[in-house]
Amino acid sequence: MRLVLDTGACQGHGRCYSYSPDLFDADEEGHSVLLVSKVSPEQADSARLAVESCPEEAISLHE
C-alpha cells in the first residue's frame, strides 16, 4: 500500500501525527509530513486511521 499526503490540502489539525506517529510528523508550522510512503502490513490499520481522521481529506491510501 502507498500512503499519499496532499500538502496543499493539509491545514495542520494534527490528527494524523497524533493518531499515527509511526507514519506522520509535524513540520515547524504544524502541518503534516509523511515519514513513509510505502505502508507495511503492520502499519495498515494506523494508515487507515489517519485517512479516516483527516477532516481535510488530505490523506489517501492506495493499494
Image (cartoon, helix red, strand yellow):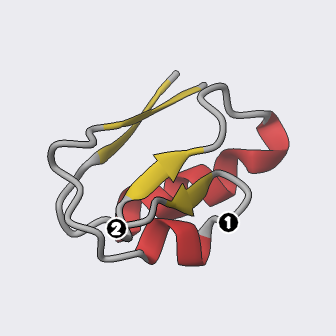
Amino acid carrying mark 2 in the image: Glu
Q: In percent of the image, x 38 and y 63: which residue is there?
A: 52
Label located before the other in sequence (1 or 2): 1
**6 with respect to 1 (left or right):** left
- Residue 43, disc: none
Which image quarter: residue 17?
bottom right
Report the label total.
2
- Residue 21, disc: 1
**55 with respect to 28 (left or right):** left
At which x and y percent is residue 47? 58, 51
Question: Up-down: is 43 above or below 1?
Answer: below
Which image quarter: residue 8?
top left
Furthest toward the front, the residue is: 28
Q: Do the residues labelled 1 and 2 touch (CB within 8 Å)?
A: no
Assign a secondary structure to mark 2: loop
Foreground: disc 1 or disc 2? 2
Question: Up-down: is 3 above or below 50?
Answer: above
At which x and y percent is residue 27? 46, 59
Q: In which quarter of the image is the N terminus?
A: top right
Q: In percent of the image, x 48 and y 61: which residue is there?
A: 50
Question: Alpha carbon of mark 1 to alpha carbon of mark 2: how far?
Answer: 17 Å
At which x and y percent is residue 43? 75, 48
Q: In percent of the image, x 58 and y 60: which residue is there?
A: 25
Furthest toward the right, the residue is: 42
Q: Between residue 31 and residue 36, name the one nearer to us.
A: 31
Question: Up-down: is 29 above or below 44?
Answer: below
Q: Which residue in the protein does label 2 denote? A: 29
Classed neighbour count for the residue bearing mark 2: other residues with Cα under 10 Å, few (<14), some (14–19), many (≥20): few
